[in-house]
Amino acid sequence: MKLYGIFLLILLLVLQYKLWFEEGGYFYNRELQKQLAAMRIENEQLRKKNRELARRIILVKEDMNEIESLARQNLGMIKEDEQFMFLIDEDQVKMQQERPQDRQQEAGRHNE
C-alpha cells in the first residue's frame, strides 16, 4: 500500500510538472498570450499605416496638386517660369573647405 501511495505521488508530480512547465502548460500559454497581445498591437499599427498609404494613393490618383507637390518635394522639380534658389549656409561652406586640407595633411602623414 505504501508503494502504491508513492507511485501516485510521483504520478501527480509528473502531471503537475507537465501542467505548469511543458509546452501547452500554464506558463507556456501565458507567454503565448503576451506574444499575441504584442502582435495585435503591431497589426493595428500596420493597419493604420496601410490606411494612410491607401489614402495617399487615392489622393495622388485624383489630385494633380498632390502629384505636383510630391514631384517638388521628392524630385526637386520646378515649373518652367519659376526660379530655383539654393541657399547655402556659410558655416557649412567653411567646414567643407577645411576638410580637403585636413585630408591632404593626413595623406601626407601616411606617405611619410
Image (cartoon, rainbow, N blue to C red):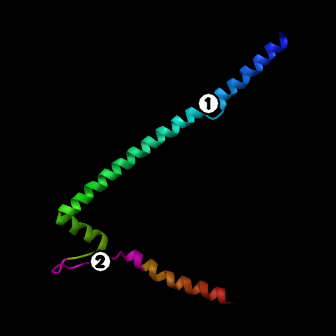
Residue at image mark 1: 25
Residue at 30% from the left image edge and 53% from the top image edge = 52
The circle drawn on residue 7 is none
Earlier sequence position, callout 2 versus callout 1 = 1
Q: Nearer the viewer, residue 31 or 5?
A: 5
Q: Quarter of the image containing the C terminus? A: bottom right
Mark 1: which secondary structure?
loop
Residue on which disc 2 sits: 86
Tell me residue 68's x, y (percent): 21, 69
Asked if residue 49 lies left or right of residue 10, the reply is left
Picture residue at 52% right of the left edge, 40% below the top: 35
Image coordinates for residue 79, horizontal then vertical, percent: 18, 77
Lateral position of residue 43 relative to residue 69, left or right = right
Helix, strand or loop at mark 2: loop
Q: Position of residue 107 (x, y in %)?
A: 60, 86
Say which of 63 and 90 sits in front. 63
- Mark 1 crowdedness (10 Å alpha carbons): few <14, some 14-19, many ≥20: some
What is the magenta range? Answer: 79-93
In the rendered structure, the answer to whether residue 107 lies left or right of residue 71 reads right
- Left or right, residue 14 beside residue 78: right
Position of residue 109 relative to residue 87, above or below, is below
Of the residues shown, which amino acid type is indicated by label 2?
Phe
